Amino acid sequence: WDALMNAPLALDDVILAEMLWAATKSLFSGIAILGVMAGLGIGLHPHTLLVVPLLFLIGMTFASLGLVINALARGYDFFTYYFTLVLTPMVFLSGVYYPTTQLPIWLQAISHCLPLSAAVSLIRPMILGSWPDMALANIAILSAYCAGGFYVATVLTRRRLLK
């Protein structure tokens, strides 16, 4: 990190590089899962190939959110708050384990605004061989979280480094 800070790079470049690296790791993990699925004969549809660029976008989105938390964290234990108070409820509200239509109406409205819900709404139909409903809206949600997270992470990291 010290070498990067002494190189002719802007802080924005460093944060973007961190996001790209995290997105690349998520892409590799997603491709490995798609390979296992293909080996088991699951999701053998042309639509499944379109999941690959979405994996990169989803990785960028969650990397930007993770970098926001990284900028706020005072220590390693702070990350347990993020997992407990943000990620775990998001998993339960985003239709990962059960359909969001089983949620109360007010929770469904919140669920549709979450990035993980957008990711599930995009990828699940493609794996099952159909096109997702409201694909552009879900891509816009992911892109908004990605861009907003990048901006907030940059501001918070700059503030933290200047202290």
Image (cartoon, rainbow, N blue to C red):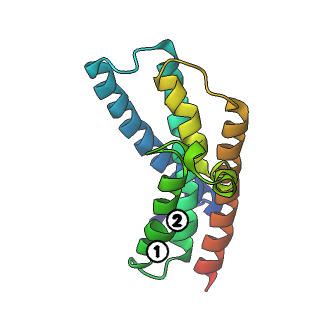
In the rendered structure, the answer to whether residue 26 lies left or right of residue 72 reads left
Residue sitting at x 64%, y 56%: 107
Q: Nearer the viewer, residue 4 or 159?
A: 159
Amino acid found under the numbered disc labelled 1? Tyr
Amino acid found under the numbered disc labelled 2? Val
- Residue 57 visible (yes or no): no
Residue sitting at x 37%, y 28%: 34
Quarter of the N terminus within the rendering:
bottom left
Q: Position of residue 17 (x, y in %)?
A: 54, 52
Q: Position of residue 29 (x, y in %)?
A: 36, 39
Using the image, determine if residue 50 lies above or below residue 141.
Answer: above
Q: In whole angstroms, how far apart are the C-alphas of marks 2 and 1?
A: 8 Å
Using the image, determine if residue 87 lies above or below residue 109.
Answer: below
Using the image, determine if residue 68 lies above or below residue 131.
Answer: below
**Tags 2 and 1 touching, CB below 8 Å:** yes
Per the image, label 1 sits on a secondary structure element best described as helix
The residue beneath circle 2 is: 86
Per the image, label 2 sits on a secondary structure element best described as helix
The label shown at residue 81 is 1
The label shown at residue 19 is none
Crowding around mark 2 (Cα neighbors within 10 Å: few <14, some 14 to 19, many 20+) is: few
Q: Position of residue 158 (x, y in %)?
A: 64, 73
In the rendered structure, the answer to whether residue 57 lies left or right of residue 139 reads left
Rendering quarter of residue 84? bottom left
Q: Nearer the viewer, residue 75 or 13?
A: 75
Residue sitting at x 47%, y 45%: 96
Q: Position of residue 18 (x, y in %)?
A: 51, 55
- Residue 130 visible (yes or no): yes
Residue sitting at x 47%, y 48%: 21
Quarter of the C terminus within the rendering:
bottom right
